[in-house]
Image (cartoon, grey):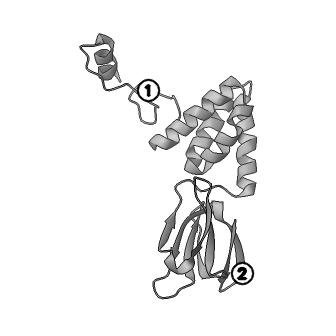
Amino acid sequence: GQLKIDTAFGTLTLNAGEIKQLTRSKTSLRDVQAVMWDDTQLSGQLQDSSLDVRLKCGASMKVPVVLLEDYSQSRPEPSKAVAERIGKMIAELNSDDWATRDRVQEALTQMGPVVISVLQGLRNQQSPEGQQRIDQIILSIERGQKGTPGAGAPGAAGAVQPEVPNMDPRFDPMIDVLQNRW
């Protein structure tokens, strides 16, 4: 939903999905500090005395603001304008030019976790090449690697390393070779 916060400059309406963190002041019942998806920080007083909360299981409830200490969301949604820009970039993952595909893949990876929800939402509408690149972007972001996906030699800075299972090499001699190589 949306939250209305009265600040020193006026009332702001925030989309709850774009909030990365919300912290209540220890000295006031309705004063909060919000950190948005792009790390913009703002503070003020909530207009409502309770928050509408929807749990992952689908249940909805009202939580009094006085019970809120700190709310964190690891994957906030980007603003509508940024989501549209990401959508246009995703379309370029299907370009005939491999350099364009690589450039866009790198740019989306550099944007970080905020792109994941948009990528997941548009993945099934892409070509197999686009879907594969989206999977690589998400994997790189989740691993915390911001380098060029798939670039460089194995072990090079920024290279995406294949996941090699931690298995006893006596069961498969190739596992030992792969682990030493990668």
Residue 88 visible in the shown view: yes
- Residue 146 visible? The answer is no
| Residue 65 to residue 139: above or below | below
Name the residue carrying label 2: 11
Image x and y of residue 39, in percent = 56, 64
- Position of 20 with respect to 52 (left or right) is left
Q: Residue at x 62, y 54 (%)?
A: 58
Q: Quadrant of residue 119?
A: top right
The span from disc 2 to disc 1 (Cα, nearest Å) is: 49 Å
For this orientation, the residue located farthest to the left is 170
Q: Which one is in front, 178 or 65?
A: 65
Q: Quadrant of the C terminus?
A: top left
Q: Above or below — where is 7 with respect to 119?
A: below
User: How many residues crowd around disc 2 within 10 Å: few (fewer than 14), some, or many (20 or more)?
Assistant: some
Circle 1 sits in a helix, a strand or a loop, which is it? loop
Q: Which mark is residue 40?
A: none
- In the image, residue 55 above or below residue 152: below
Residue that label 1 marks: 162
Give the left or right position of residue 54, taking residue 172 as reference.
right
Amino acid type at mark 2: Thr
Would you call the spot at circle 1 few (<14 residues within 10 Å), some (14-19), or many (20 or more)?
few
Q: Amino acid at mark 1?
A: Pro
Specify which label sits upstream in the sequence, 2 or 1: 2
Residue in the picture at 51% in, 88% down: 28
Q: Which of these two is toward me, 170 or 68? A: 68
- In screen coordinates, is 163 left or right of 76? left
Which quadrant would residue 47 be assigned to in this image? bottom right
Q: Residue 6 at x, y = what percent?
A: 67, 83
Residue at disc 2, secondary structure: strand
